[in-house]
Image (tube, rainbow, N blue to C red):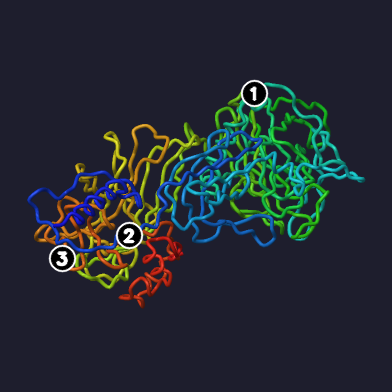
Amino acid sequence: MDRRFLLFAFVAMMVFLLTGCMNHGEVVYDDPVKPGQPESTEKDFNKFDFSTVSPSVTVTVNYNLPTKAGVYFELYDQDPTVDIADGASFTMKEGVEPLYAGMTDANGHFSQEMALPAYVKTLYAFSPSFFAPKVISGSLNGNAVTCSFDYQDYVNASRVKVRSVMETANEHDTKMLIGTGNNYPDAPWKNWLVTYDKKKGGHVTNLYTGTELKVENSTELYTAHQAVINVNKKCPEEYRSSADFYIKEDSEVALTFLGGYTCWNSSLGYYYYKDGEKPSDLVGNVVLVFPNTQVGAIKQNAWNSYPQAGINEGDCVQLKYYPNIASGSQEGATTVFPAGYRIGLVLATNAWTNRVATTFGKHDKRYRSATSSGLSVDNGGNAYTTPRTAAYRYGNYVMVSFEDHIDDQNFSDVVVTLKSNPVKAIEVPEIPGGDIITEVKSLRGVYCFEDLWPEKGDYDMNDVLTKVTYAKSIDQNNKIYSESHIFQSFENFATKNNGLAVRVSGLATEDQLKLYRRKSGETEYKEIDINYVPDEKVVYITSDVKQYKNAEYKLTVFHRGTVSKEKISVIPFLYRQDPDGQWEVHMPKDKPTKKINTKLFGKGDDATNVSTGVYFVRDGNYPFAIFLAGATEADLKGLLDRANEGKPIDELYPNYAKWATSGGKDGIDWYK
């Protein structure tokens, strides 16, 4: 053996030790091949590792907002939103999944080093939080990308009109449209409680200025709201309710406006009744609180209603009880509500009469969202059969969120809080206790395998395909309680019974591992026995991927306490039982387990070199396995089509050859 080869072998070994498995997860384990075991024949192999990942990118997300609270956000490789036709709201694009999900700190800042798909040039940070911009973006600059929004810069921009409420020549007011079908008489609100500027947005001029009923820490409330309501974009069913608020002891009550996420200039009022005597309609019963709940803070869409803003975050009004309201008299009004009564709230969409012409017209909206069952109606006056409000208690506060005209189901169009004195005088159903823990998911990508190793295959890369989704259970402070990896299997056309296993890294000794399965057509995961080999950090997921077609397997790590950053990563591999040991196929250059049948090294197309620690490689531009970072089902269309069985991957993806021959420099988005 000449010196040039020894030098090359030494360099190759060092490159492997330094780079390892960064292309799809950091894993540290002993070399399974021991002295005296057979070594492979030395062969040329493609030095390209076929990685589709940029392993070390510093991602920064900054929200410089007037509202100081952690912001939930998701990172995408494209703008994930689509405006609804009338421009009043938006929906999420189908098939687009986040690459990361998490929270900023209380100052709106997040920075973390992470692996991103190599094709990503621009990141889009989407937030469903009502007090943050919908989407902000940033372009990759070297190994860093920053998505930033500065509220003051936004306000100062000459092209943006924010809070520039101009006084109008005529007075404007509010009305609540009622009735059913085409019968919509105006039902005037009881304008007994508040005074407001009728020429300038309807701003309330006699706000509550006391201390007993004021919000003490709005940061906690904003953080709690998005943890409960917005993390999954649709309000969870357990917090939706059609229930008014029961007063169990004499108490004072104030209502504070927290914010909103809507283009409509809606009005908010309250009503009350003795428990068991819920009104059949709201005619003459509603007392006006806020004439115009358009906050005009951050413009999310092509909305023209912002200059008509009529409220500020934190505006607070103390409610009154009028014992003679039925007779139309204010006599005996008091700030104390008697025990045994219920308070209801109602939001009338676009009820402020200074409506503006927009791309979707200038017209009344008859939608009404009430906390009472049966009193919410659509634009045709038909009663909703499902709740249009969400309510829950957080500490000393009752949080209430409204869904107005558009059915985006985020229940964040108007968000308010009630505080009583005594603080627990109001009973609210569905009260969450302790930390609010929510599972959020992000896409890792798809692993594609050839199952004829070490022999030459057809390199259609579809013998086994598994999509990996990462999930973590977090609280409102972004602390992680558990981490999961979900493995989605697909229909495949392989004749062999391949098993799926994963090597896990990041485990702590006190962590607990559990494995779950959800068969095709099932809605819930069921725990199954786990086969875990501790010394190699290997979990055998299933011995036959074809046994349950299209099943999902969920491997969960439960941390003792919490962790502040994602700790757990996995690398899948295939295995089968072999008379001389275990047959396996891993990602290029990854090491096998100690069970591997070492006699297979160097056979057929395999160019494994045990002496340099390089495994599962071959000459040419086809690997035995490949990881497609950020790939979705839509990207697998060609691989999943039975008509393409046996066709090598470069026939299905025209830019694959350019990518492979350039060592990953060109055509990096070949599978997108």
Q: Is residue 294 visible?
A: no
In the image, taking residue 42 as reference, residue 652 lies left or right, namely right
Q: Which mark is residue 48?
A: 2
Instruction: Assign a secondary structure to mark 1.
Output: strand
Q: Is residue 314 above or below residue 297?
A: above
Image quarter in which the N terminus is found = bottom left
Instruction: Assign a secondary structure to mark 2.
Output: loop
Task: Name the residue carrying label 3.
Answer: 603
- Mark earlier in primary sequence (3, 1): 1
Instruction: Assign a secondary structure to mark 3.
Output: loop
Q: Residue most toward the front?
A: 3
Q: Quadrant of residue 272?
A: top right
**Residue at 43% across, 65% down:** 671
Task: Name the residue carrying label 1.
Answer: 421
- Mark earlier in primary sequence (1, 2): 2
Q: Quadrant of residue 514?
A: top left
Q: Of the residues shown, which amino acid type is indicated by label 2?
A: Phe
Q: Of the residues shown, which amino acid type is indicated by label 3?
A: Lys
Q: Is residue 120 above or below residue 277?
A: below
Q: Which mark is residue 39?
A: none
Q: Of the residues shown, which amino acid type is indicated by label 1?
A: Asn
Q: Looking at the picture, how far across and down is residue 236, in whole percent?
A: 52, 46
Crowd band around label 3 with a 10 angstrom C-alpha radius: few (<14), some (14–19), many (20+): some
Q: Looking at the picture, how far across and down is residue 26, in whole percent?
A: 32, 46
